[in-house]
Amino acid sequence: MILNMQSTTTLFRLSTTALLIAGLLAVSLSACSQEEQAQVPAKAGGLDQTGPYDVVAGWFKPGIDRWDQPVIAVAIDNADRIFIGNADQNATQPFAPMLSPIGVVLEERSATSSKPDSEKTHAHQIMVLNANGEVIEDWSQWDDTIVIPHNIEINPYDPERHLWVVDRDDHQIHKFTNDGKKLVMTLGESGVPGTDENHFDRPAALAFLPDGSFYVADGYGNSRIIKFDKYGNFLLEWGSKGDGPGQFDLVHSVTIDSQNRVYASDRSNHRIQVFDENGTFIQEWPNVGSPTRVVVAEDDTVWIADAEYNRIANFDLQGKLQTYWGVSGDTPGAMDNPHSFAIDDFGNLFVADAWNNRLQKFKPSANADKTRLIAPAFIFKK
């Protein structure tokens, strides 16, 4: 069909008008979209103080007036039965917060300690909290047995859920029934440090294998890792004082992955070291602050608590940093020497915030990035 000049001009004008209208519509829609975004902005500001978690402020309720003991260890039996290990009042830091029975921070503080020496007691070494942070058990019957419960653990392969206590300053490791009524095993000699198969020198932590055997970080006075069978019989050891491969300067925590590799927090050397199950050195991860606890999670990542920068950090199994969060301080969610941590069955994180004299509870935030949440600790499946 042949168009005359008038028809061609008319079509051109119609096309131009259509393009102009389409362009104006696109600009209008873009402006509307920008306006909607302006009304609902992305979250601004913040220093990622608590990462993918919300802190439950004031959760810890010690039930004791003028509470001023560092909480240095935590172990989860279940969501309504949470064990904590507490240093005594001689370990309280200058100007550390003092708490009321219901966990309210009191104004009273001191440059020397929270309480005068005449009021200090050696008590409340092991306590059990419920899901509301209230004390439901105080194992006072063992206060004269335990000096410093530096690490407490429940063997995940043990159906009776015994509680193990690494008593750093008395150079011993104790195994108690879950109800605290009976002491069923003790390794080491009370008050006697040593370097042989039957003695420790200020041990720091332990970790279990499915057959009941376990590794001990004999790490403050000695610089070694020891393996025992489930009966407490010596199997092997490795390590010496220093900063070379397989040497330690305060081996503070140990954990195990699915390949039986042993990860050790070499705290004062500011690194994590990785070994095979017999102590052969594999690799080191340097420059990780002051790692107090190291845990392999079930998703094959490694989490540490760092007491130098007061943060929680995550690495892959090759030691590559994945994420971290945390700030220093004593406000809710801030930390001062996060000395241990544990996860309950609901994904809640519990941090032994030592120099703030409290156990902090963090719950996963709504719509949290799940890759930044701490998965449960790895255990071998039956």
Image (cartoon, helix red, strand yellow):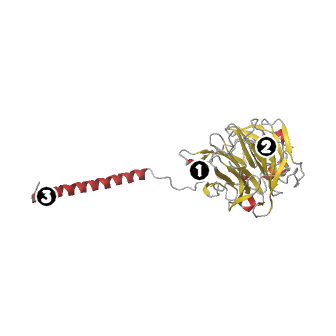
**Structural distance between the alpha carbons of marks 3 and 2:** 92 Å
* The N terminus sits in image quarter: bottom left
Disc 3 vs disc 1: Cβ atoms closer than 8 Å?
Answer: no
Query: Where does the image place residue 308, in percent across and percent down from the top left?
Result: 69, 59
Location of mark 1 (residue): 372
Query: Where does the image place residue 35, in percent across and percent down from the top left?
Result: 38, 52
Comparing labels 3 and 1, the label whose residue is closer to the camera = 3
- Residue 8: which numbered mark, if any? 3
Residue at image location 83% in from the left, 49% down from the top: 235
Tell me the crowding category of disc 1: few under 14, some 14 to 19, or many 20 or more residues within 10 angstroms, Cα based: some
Residue at image location 51% in from the left, 55% down from the top: 44
Q: Looking at numbered disc 2 in the image, what kind of residue is underneath it?
A: Trp
Q: Does dot 1 land on a helix, a strand or a loop?
A: helix
Query: Where does the image place residue 274, in percent across and percent down from the top left?
Result: 71, 56
> Mark 3 or mark 2: which comes first in sequence?
3
Q: Looking at numbered disc 3 in the image, what kind of residue is underneath it?
A: Thr
203 shown above or below 63: below
Tell me the crowding category of disc 3: few under 14, some 14 to 19, or many 20 or more residues within 10 angstroms, Cα based: few
Asked if one can make out residue 34 in the rendered structure from this viewpoint, the answer is: yes
Disc 3 vs disc 2: Cβ atoms closer than 8 Å?
Answer: no
> Mark 3 or mark 1: which comes first in sequence?
3
Disc 1 vs disc 2: Cβ atoms closer than 8 Å?
Answer: no
- Residue 164: which numbered mark, if any? 2
